[in-house]
Structures are given as structure tokens and as C-alpha cells.
Image (spheres, helix red, strand yellow):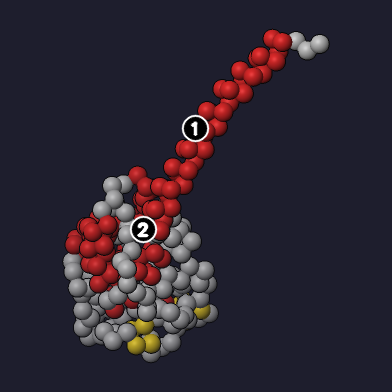
Amino acid sequence: MKNPFKINKNIKLKKIAVPVTVLLLTGSLTAFSYNTELTTSTYVKSPDFLEKKKDSVASVKAFEKVYSVLMSPRCMNCHPIGDIPLQGEDSHIHTMQPKRGKDGKGLYAMKCANCHQPENTPGLHAPPGNPNWHLPPADMKMVFEGKTANQLAKQLIDPNQNGHKDMKKLIEHADDGLVLAGWKPAEGLKLPPISHKEFKKAWITWLETGAYAPKQ
């Protein structure tokens, strides 16, 4: 004969286990619903973005300014579709046809630093300069050329495409040396459409309000 106390104890445990299971399932479903809503509307990849206040209108409006800078020759010329950088205000193929190379600094003897010195070379249409002049590396090309605002916004916050940058690193990137070089163009080259201060403000606003991608 089985011990009745043992049976009752088991029944009691089962009764407790049922609501706990329900609570766990309810919590899981709620979390799934929340994350799905965010990912489909904002293409959020990093948990960092979930901690900020969302404002799709402010975010998209800020990205319009960001996009205008990234698609200007000062940025896009070093983010081409192919492995040859672009050049000039019309973003034509670089006349010397240097190749990207594995590290983005050129291939074989034709290195970016051969012509692009630490500072802008004096003279009209002479090479702009920076101590770290290069294209993005071959394994993380970060193409801007031909991208719609929607495509570029999604690419910029995807760690698998943006150089493994999280929220903090993306914000810091606004003050990267090569980014700043866009506002110190060589003689005869135009500045980006807005100041760096305006760009940085728009960049941070876009990120901190949800990094929403425009529909187009």
C-alpha cells in the first residue's frame, strides 16, 4: 500500500508547478511579442538599442540629415560598391585605380598612404590627407554607394556589417579621425551639406531614439 502522505505531497507540488509554468510561458510570449515589434519596425540588432526611448518620427527625421552626409562625396567616395575608391564631386572611379586590399589600405606597392599624406597636400585638387587614410577592409566593406536610406540605416546598426560596433562604439565613431577629415577637404573639394556638429547631433539622436530605418 502506497503512503498517502507521499501521494498528497506530490499532488501539492503539481498544483504549485502549474501556475509557475503558466507564468513562465506568459513572460516568454510577452518578451517575444515586444522584441518582434521592435525588430520589424526598427531593425534593431543590439540589446543596447532596447534601453533607449523610442521616437520613430524624431529618429527618421534625424537620419535624413545623417543620410545627406553619408551620401555626399566626402563620405561615399571611400565607401564604393567595388574595390576602387571614387574621386571628385561627381564620384567617378579613382584615376589611379588603386585597389582596396585586405586591410583597406591598398594592394601591393600601390598603398593609399603613397599619395594621401598625414595632411592635405597643398594645391588645387591635390590629394586630401589623413594619417589613417584607407577604405573599409575587404571583410567589412561598408558600402554606401547606391544604398537607399532604408538599406543604409539597417546596415549601419547591423554588427555583422558595421565592424561589430555596438551603440557606444557607433556614437564614438562620429568623432573618428577619418569622419572628421570629411570636414577638412583638400582645396577645390566641397564640405558635406551640414556641419560636423549638426551631423553628430543628428547621428546620436537617430541612434538614441531607436535607430529607425526610413521606409524608402
The amino acid type of the residue labelled 2 equals: Thr
Q: Position of residue 35 (x, y in %)?
A: 42, 49
Instruction: Identify the residue position indicated by label 1 in the image.
Output: 23
Q: How many residues crowd mark 1 within 10 Å: few (<14), some (14–19), many (20+)? A: few
**Of marks 1 and 2, which one's residue comes earlier in the chain?**
1
Q: Which residue is at the front of the view, 152 or 6?
A: 6
Q: Quadrant of the N terminus?
A: top right
* Residue positioned 56% across, 28% down in the render: 18
As displayed, is residue 53 above or below residue 12?
below
* Residue positioned 34% across, 78% down in the render: 77
* Residue positioned 36% across, 83% down in the render: 86
Q: Position of residue 204 (x, y in %)?
A: 27, 55
The amino acid type of the residue labelled 1 equals: Leu
Q: Position of residue 144 (x, y in %)?
A: 37, 74
Kindly state the secondary structure of the residue where label 1 is placed. helix
Instruction: Identify the residue position indicated by label 2 in the image.
Output: 42
Q: Evaluate whether residue 191 shows in this view.
A: yes
* Residue positioned 52% across, 33% down in the render: 22
Q: Which residue is at the front of the view, 36 or 185?
A: 36
Residue 216, image quadrant:
bottom left
Q: Position of residue 148 (x, y in %)?
A: 34, 74
* Residue 139 shown left or right of residue 166 in the figure: right
* Residue 7 shown left or right of residue 151 in the figure: right
Residue 174, image quadrant:
bottom left
